[in-house]
Amino acid sequence: MNGIWPLGSSVKHLTIAGGAMLYNAALARNFSPSWFEPQFWTERGELAGTARGRGTAHYVRTAERDLVLRHYRRGGLAARVFADRYLWRGEERTRPFAEWALTHRLHLAGLPVPVPIAARYVRHGRLYRGDIITERIASTGSLTEALRSEALPLLTWISIGRCIRRFHDLGVCHADLNAHNVLLGDQAVYLVDFDRCSLRADGLWRDGNLVRLRRSLEKISYGLPAERFTDADWQALLGGYRQSSAPPAGAAAQHT
Ligand SMILES: Nc1ncnc2c1ncn2[C@@H]1O[C@H](COP(=O)(O)OP(=O)(O)O)[C@@H](O)[C@H]1O
Ligand SMILES: [Mg+2]
């Protein structure tokens, strides 16, 4: 891992049967491999619910912090054959380690992302399975959930545009920028799900990300009252995106 990015001294790397784990010892002091098993949390009475993505995200409530545990699952046609198995191409290219490392880096740069706690892969011959644990964002829900219950103020759309712009200015191409992966907090807008995301030089991928979000918004607002997603909303989002996105003083420079 350290070949790509320095992860910092609190990040521990452990070899386990058939695989390896990464975890941030400063944030998960009593960490154990059983944290990756939903059963472990169920038995302790600390499972606090689930969310659906491609797979199931488990919400966990520990005494110290709220967590989200996700097992990597494939979507689309490949899911029928491979379900939750991926081709081994080296540790750094496993889904969990790559997502963990990118999210860790974005967090250090001061971007609104979930704080990564731990990641694991376990090999099965030429394939592997993987999991990731992040700190749960105290959000009022995803953009999808918000739109299903009410129309949003224009200011929220502007904030979403600004948020996306901050990621793009760092070169983060989000592989799946849809309304489920935008979370609305009381104070801030967050992006989640950095699986398969990459850091890139400027390019048309920026527009590609926005087009994908627009399609997702059209899809989820189909069948909802027309005022839930209007052209003015989208223009407000683009307006926020176009404003220059100076990061909070020193935030990015301190850690990179
Ligand atoms: N750290 C987090 N805090 C709060 N909710 C989260 C967090 N991570 C994921 N979620 C919720 O779980 C859903 C699925 O997680 P996601 O990372 O998008 O995985 P998938 O690859 O399955 O889409 C998200 O859309 C979001 O609603
Ligand atoms: Mg997602």
Image (cartoon, grey):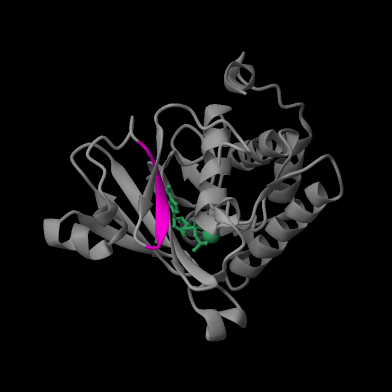
Residue under the image location 41 percent in, 53 percent down: 20
Give percent across and percent down for residue 198: 69, 48
Give percent across and percent down for residue 207: 81, 50
Q: Which residue is more in the foreground, 29 or 139? A: 29
For this orientation, the residue located farthest to the top is: 249
Magenta-drawn stretch, dominant element (helix, strand or loop): strand
Magenta segment range?
A: 18-24
Q: Is residue 22 magenta?
A: yes
Give percent across and percent down for residue 251: 58, 19
Residue 234 located left or right of residue 151: right
Does residue 22 lie above or below 214 as drawn? above
Residue under the image location 53 percent in, 28 percent down: 108
Does residue 175 lie above or below 75 as drawn? above
Q: Quadrant of the C terminus?
A: top right
- Residue 1: which quarter of the image? top right
Residue 192 in view: no
Residue under the image location 67 percent in, 41 percent down: 164
Give percent across and percent down for residue 66: 29, 44
- Residue 47: which quarter of the image? bottom left
Q: Which residue is more in the foreground, 80 or 68? A: 80
Q: Which residue is more in the foreground, 208 or 188? A: 208
Q: Is residue 10 magenta?
A: no
